Image (tube, helix red, strand yellow):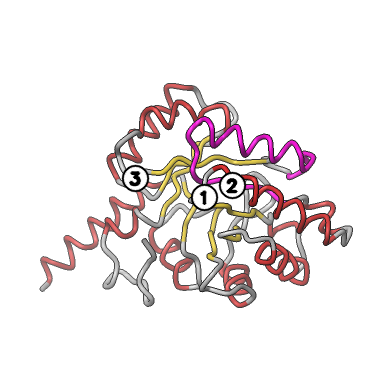
Amino acid sequence: MSPPSNPSIETLTPEAVAKTIDHALLKPDMTIDEVIEGCRLCAKYQTASVCVKPCDVKIAADVLQGTGVDVGTVIGFPHGNTPANVKVCEALTAIDDGAVELDMVLNIGHLKSRRFDEVRNEIRDLTMAAKAKLPTCCIKVIFECSLLTDEEKITACKLSEDAGADYVKTSTGFSTGGATIADLKLMRANTNPSTTRVKASGGIRTLDFLIECLQAGADRIGASATAAIVDEMRARKATEFKLQ
C-alpha cells in the first residue's frame, strides 16, 4: 500500500499511517520477550512489516504468521562492512527463516572510496540471489546519509537503482544522524518513482514528522514509536470528526 499523493492529516487514516511503517526491533540488548511483544504490537496495529535482527527472524515469522504483517530483517548491519558474499549468505538464510524484506547496508567506505562498480555489484548480487530464491522479496539499500555528501547520496541512488533494488533508505538509526527532509527530497529526485521507492528511517518519533517525510517523497517509514504515532492519528481524527 502506497500513501496518498498528497499525504496529510485530512487525507490519511490511522490504518494508512500504520501501513507506511516498518516497526523496528533492532536494539542490540532487546530480549526475545521484547521481540515477541513488538511483533504482537505490529499485528495489533497492522503495520507494513516488522524489522528484526537476523537472529530473531524465525521468532517474528512464527508470531506474525497469518497476520498480514511482513517480516523483514537487516543485512550487513549497521555499518555495511561485511564482505559481499557474506551479505548474500545472510540474505538467503534470512529468507529461509521467514523474512520477505531485506534492508541491506551498502559498503559505505567503498562508496566513499569511489569503488562504484564494486558497490553496484554487491547490491546486484544480493538482489539477484534473494529474488531467485523468493521473487517477491523486497530489497532496501541503506545509505547512512549522515556520513555521505550529497554527491555520494546521488551516486548511491543511481547504483542502487541500476542494481535492481526496490527501495533506497536514509539511515540505520545507529549512526550520527537519521532521516532529514532534505535527504528524502534528494533521494526522490534522483530515483525513478515507478521502479524505486524511498524509505525514511532514523529519528521519526512523531506523527507530524512522519507526514513531513511522506510529503518529501518517502513511501515507507522505519520507526519504533509506532503505537504513539498511530494513536496520535486516531486522536486527531476523532477530534476532527467531533468538529464536523
Point out which mark residue 227 bears: 3
Q: Residues within 10 Å of mark 1 (few under 14, many from 20)?
A: few
* For residue 144, side relative to residue 184 (left or right): right
* Residue drawn at x 69%, y 66% as measured from the top left: 162
The magenta stretch spans residue 91:
yes
Whether pointer 2 and pointer 1 mark residues with C-beta atoms closer than 8 Å, the reply is: yes
Q: Nearer the viewer, mark 3 or mark 1?
A: 1
Q: Could you say where residue 91 lies in the image, as x and y percent from the top left? A: 62, 39
Q: Could you say where residue 157 lies in the image, as x and y percent from the top left? A: 68, 67
Q: Residue 37 versus residue 129: which sits nearer the camera?
A: 129
* Kind of element beneath mark 2: helix
Residue 89 vertical position relative to residue 224 in the rendered view, above or below:
above
Residue 57 vertical position relative to residue 236 in the rendered view, above or below:
above
Whether pointer 2 and pointer 3 mark residues with C-beta atoms closer than 8 Å, the reply is: no
Q: Label 3 sits on what residue type?
A: Ala
Q: Label 1 sits on what residue type?
A: Pro
* Kind of element beneath mark 1: loop
| Quadrant in which residue 34 is drawn | top left
Q: Could you say where residue 240 lies in the image, as x and y percent from the top left? A: 18, 68
The magenta stretch spans residue 176:
no
Identify the image quadrant of the C terminus.
bottom left
Residue stretch rendered in magenta on the structure: 80-106
The residue that mark 1 highlights is: 135
The residue that mark 2 highlights is: 132
Q: Residue 105 versus residue 17: which sits nearer the camera?
A: 105
Q: Label 2 sits on what residue type?
A: Ala
Residue 61 vertical position relative to residue 234 in the rendered view, above or below:
above
* For residue 176, side relative to residue 233 (left or right): right
